Amino acid sequence: MASLYLAPEVRRLALASQGWRGLVGVLALVLGVALGYGVHRVHAVAVAEAEEAARRLAGEADLAVQAIQGGMAESLYPRLATRPEVAAASPLVELEAKVPSKGPDGRERLRVLGLDIFRAAELQPVLAALPEPTEALYPDRVFLNPAAAAWLGVGPGGTVALQSGMGAVTFKVAGTVDLPGQPLAIMDIAAAQGAFGFLGSLSRIDLRLKPGVDRTRAATALASLLPAGVRIEPPTARARQVAEFTRAYRVNLGMLALVALFTGGLLVFSSQALAVVRRRPQLALLRTLGLSRRELLTLLLAEALVLGLAGSLVGVVLGQGLADLLLRTVGADLGSTYLRGLAPRAGVDWGMAAAYVALGMATALAGSLAPALEAARASPARALRGGDGEELSARRPSPRTGLFLAFLAGVAVGLPAVARLPVFGYVAVALFLLAAIALLPWATGLLLALAARLPLSRWVAAQLGLAQLRAAAGQVSLSLAPLVASVAVAAAMAVMVGSFRHSLEDWLDRLLPADLYLRTGGPGDSAFLPAEAQSRLAALPGMARIEFRRSLNLSLAPDKPPVALLVRTVNAGTPDSTLPLVGPWRLPGRGYPEVWISEAMPDLYGWHPGQIVELPLEKGALPARVAGVWRDYARSGGAIVLDRDAYVAASGDTSANEAAIWLAPGTEAGEVAREIADLFPGGRVAVEFPGELKRFSLSLFDRTFAATYALEAAAVVVGLAGLSASFAALVLARRREFGVLRHLGMDRRAIAAMLAFQGALLASVALVVGFVLGGVLSIVLIQVVNRQSFHWSMDMQVPWGPLAGFAAAVACLAVLTAAASGRLAMARDAVLAVREDW
Amino acid sequence: MIRRLLLALLLAAVYTLAAAVDYPSVVAGRPLSFPRDYGSHPDFRNEWWYVTGWAKDAQGRDYGFQVTFFRHRPGVAEDSPSAFAPRQLLFAHVALTDAAGGRLHHDQRAARGGFGLAEAQREDTAVWIGDWSLRRDGETYRTRVEAGDFALALDFRPTQAPLPEGKGGYSRKGPLPRQASYYYSLPHLAVSGRVAVAGQEREVTGTAWLDHEWSSEGLAPGAVGWDWAGVNFKDGGALMAFRLRDRKGATVWSAATWRDAGGKVRTFAPGDVVFTPRRRWHSPRSGADYPVAMGIAVPGLKLELEALLDDQEIDGRRSTRAIYWEGAVRALQAGVEVGVGYLELTGYWQALKL
């Protein structure tokens, strides 16, 4: 009964005594929650924007008839519009136009939609609300959405030039159209057909069905009318593709945030465990004052919940700020280039915020459960005499648990992706982490035993320090767990990113063998080199060889992003001289043309070498044999390489949008570049040097992974803070011991040296275990997580230099922390320390 | 007249900004020539086929209906090689006044000509947007319209010769000779067919009026709107009268054609045609006040027009951004019904801006 009266007072006391050690655990929770919620918000906003834009454009359409590549014959439009199932049909021409004013290196394109305003108004209310609909009939007018107006810096009355083939067409901006999302220009369908070489063809026909018509049945019936290369699909399939683009990316970053949370949980565990040990007499006193076991347990868990709540709330607020900052600075794509041009604002997602707060609290609760149970179980009479913390280690998990967890992790590694996400890869990461934590006391004991054999250990201070650590191995491994986890994750990420970067450099070298590259635009682009421009180029002086290339978008499945068809010259006898092939390839056979597929194709479409596949070209399907698989870091949605001769024979299309140029000996590359620029004035062709291309690609890579580096650094800092907190706790608990040592004749410097040695020793243990674990995790990241997320392989490459530097930094920080704790402990008089009692 | 209002509003921007396109002028003395003039005249800027009429079902319920097809040549992208080039635009307005149900239903469509989906043929009357159509089949006109909440499947059999308006089909629309249109009417069309409204399909018969008019000219300056009426008299006579109003409601221009039961045609100059509003109805939706009871006087003929239903206002803002009143009316003389027709009241909601 007294306990009821005491409880609030006691709670206040307990919380107050947590001090800054508790804060470190909270800090980790804050970090994990902030990253997790922030990344989630940014992704959710980006996808919502893309979906909203697609939904508003699709309007009331029930179905969309889509050309898989290039266009479809416009005669399909009246055939579909007059079908009995169809209430309204809206024909569309859709293309990505290059904007010459953005300079020859401008990689961004303006999405252009050519539409029949009258038909579109029947399906898309947003288009019926154009300020001056009749303006839309003029062949030289465009309407811009806000993103396009901002990007181009023009408003109504201004002009914008768009590239078409090798020429440029100037349009007058007639007004704005209220469509969110990426930059978009809307113009009359006749204007778009005429200006961009779409005469006689359409990209898409949106359909609204008559009331009561079943959509699935209508889709089946209408599909039978469509020629090869034209597909019928739900109108918002495109938005789903955008979500698809960001999904793997989001999961990678989101899971890193969860690893931060995991580290936070470990920190809460270790700090709570140590606090319980340190406060044992205090807690025992409470028991003798009448607090029951259950009440004590409740009290300790309530403490953890309060900490978890505080940390998670701060985390959510920080995460919201992080999301806003990222959206404003980097953009919704977090530095990748998937969602160019979106400039949304991050709203608050209360449900998700609540979920992350709950997750943070659950982590805190889970972390403090074992220590709280331990404290509640202890006998008050014994505990009042003070504790040594070894009771906790008596119940530490046996190595068998750890081995079993590792075995489970091994099983998870072998499992395939779920819904094209590397779910089991992450399960394996989590299981390996848990296994390492379970094996940590055993590994610590082993490593300390090994350390005892070092000649250094004959030094008295070192012997004392080592003996002290070995005696408290359980407590030591407890305080090491967070550091081990963060070192492991940081090392694994470093190895993965290092391997990726190394493989990317190698890939760029093999893919860019020529001296100069010329580019008019990417796939689905408005700019291309007609045959006449090609012969003019080839006739320039100083050229040893010129190879023309074409890239196109092929849509092979409605729910997947388009696949790039790369048309280039492939030396059939030695394809590996042109392409970075992986695995064996077949030598040319007879009958079918050969295609070489990127690693994503087997994963996404189940294609395999030797298989006969069909490429849906505009003129009809082209059957081809898969000759081999190559590595492609540029297109995670898949790419197919087809020899140019085979493509021209099948399609009759001799145009190109890229050229690789080998120069005659003694020719200066810059001079040829100038000649090419003179040949095509107005910045309509970009000449690129392989060196610049490599630099650009690598800087893009580094920007993409900047967020990852930041996460790694944060994880290690939190891990170190955890270690220093634990260390300080250990040192404080040993104040009496230091007093005794002083009385026995050790001077302050010797004690400080002993502590520094202990710090170095602990850091070494954490680094050894962390690196071994990190190595295992890096294999999981490379072989499972990235392979399943992005469908590409990489050669493992350990960045020894940076890792050594990282290890040295961690060791130095640990020694400094230890020394600082020692100074703190010894600030009080030794005599007082000995006499001090609770 | 509403035809011109609609087009003027809808295409105001086109009118002022159109590239120099040589539209043919409307000139006096060009005789109408049939069947060619039943068909469309795509070189001219504007053209319309306009059917209004009264119908009765077996239970004696009265319906008013309007089926209008507009053709417009915006003079835009005429040299475009694209099959989608907007050389000809087509619009349609349909309305059904259900006297028993006490309300007016209406719907509208707009399309660019081409692909056989929306066309106006030259050879004879055949104009359609999707499954909305008006065609001359032999002597009989047929219209088929599936609108939002009603449907019309009506045939119109001519019982009289075409009535050329103005001087042999040259109809002045303003003080200048070029302010004119080619214009003929077909009064006393015998209506038969079906009307579907509120899920009920009914056989109907009645009398209708068809106008076919084409021109390249804009509006007379100073006009903000106009009143038009076409009346089929019980004795077989027919009257068409219109006036253009200015901002103050004064008449800017007016004209009328009266063919009496004996077939004698009289045309009246501006000074002879008098419109006198008798009763106004206030629209709670738009706030406009329409003279739904109107006195019309020409030398030798005085009529009182009374609306079948006060609320026959059409909100055409979705396609034309204009609200106007177009409705079935009874024609009375000394309180006795002598005929039925249609009255059109425009420019009462907002003045035109040309």
Image (cartoon, helix red, strand yellow):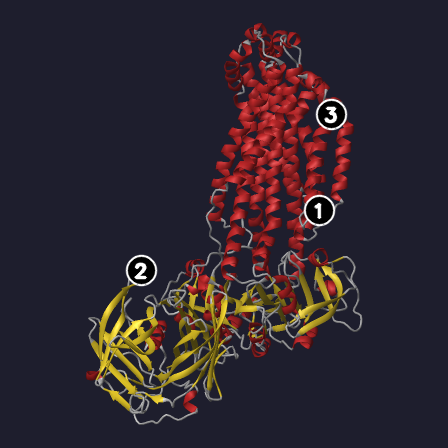
Circle 2: element type: loop
Image coordinates of residue A576 in percent, x first then y, are 73, 62
Q: Amino acid at mark 3?
A: Pro
- Co-location on one chain, circles 3 and 1: yes
Identify residue for label 3.
A397
Identify residue for label 2.
B284
Image coordinates of residue A614 in percent, x first then y, are 72, 68
Pair 2/3: label in front: 2
Q: Is B109 placed left or right of A738 in the picture?
A: left
Question: Image quadrant of residue A761?
Answer: top right
Q: Amino acid at mark 2?
A: Pro
Identify residue for label 1.
A784
Q: Amino acid at mark 1?
A: Val
- Co-location on one chain, circles 2 and 3: no
Q: Is residue A767 above or below residue A474?
A: below
Question: Image quadrant of residue A525?
Answer: bottom right
Instruction: Judge whether residue A668 can be spotted in this image.
Output: no
Residue visible at 55% across and 22% down in the picture: A303
Q: Chain of mark 3?
A: A
Q: Is residue B178 above or below residue A65?
A: below
Pair 2/1: label in front: 2
